[in-house]
Amino acid sequence: MIKLDMRDSRPIYEQIKEELKKLIIKGAMKTDEKIPSVRFLASSLSINPNTIQHAYRELEAEGYIYSRKATGYFVAPITEVVTGEKTDKLKKEMKDILKELKYLNVKKEDILSIVNEAMED
């Protein structure tokens, strides 16, 4: 389900957060589906429960999950706010990357090829 890369420079909680986001966005985890408990996930990944809790708090703040007292965490419906904010953020990141590629003299055809390839996956 969740893969961690100990060589990745990002903090573990961030890797967990991103992996869960991917699962939610791709539809592998459905709206109102219960996600693994903090203790279960910490145990299965052999990491501190506080790390999982940190990832869950951020996911909740971003609107990807919600909590119910004494029952756990669940996948939140993907709202227009979450979708719009995420889309805007990704577009900005993409523009920044494109500017950097342009600065590095990468040909437009090569960039378009990469975009087309990514859209086919």
Image (cartoon, rainbow, N blue to C red):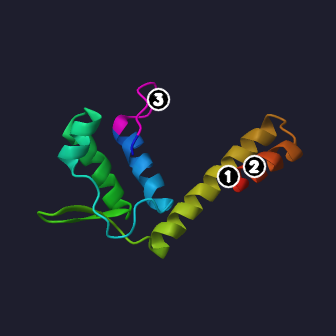
Q: Main secondary structure of the magenta part?
A: loop
Please state the horizontal and vertical placement of residue 84, each as a whole percent of the image.
Answer: 53, 69
Tell which circle, 2 or 3, labels the residue nearer the N-terminal end: 3
CB within 8 Å, label 1 to label 2: yes
Give how far apart the Cα atoms at labels 2 and 3 are: 25 Å
Residue under label 3, please give it.
8
Give how far apart the Cα atoms at labels 1 and 2 are: 7 Å
Asked if residue 15 is positioned above or below residue 70 in the image, the reply reads above
Instruction: Please name the residue shown 24% across and 47% down the image.
Output: 53
**Residue, far left:** 70
Quadrant in which residue 23 is drawn? bottom left
The residue range painted magenta reads: 3-12
Q: For residue 49: magenta?
A: no
- For badge 3, the amino acid type reads Asp
Q: For residue 10: magenta?
A: yes
Please state the horizontal and vertical placement of residue 107, each as a whole percent of the image.
Answer: 87, 41
- For badge 2, the amino acid type reads Glu
Residue under label 1, please give it.
121
Please state the horizontal and vertical placement of residue 6, each as a whole percent of the image.
Answer: 41, 26
Q: Nearer the viewer, residue 11 or 40?
A: 40
- For badge 1, the amino acid type reads Asp
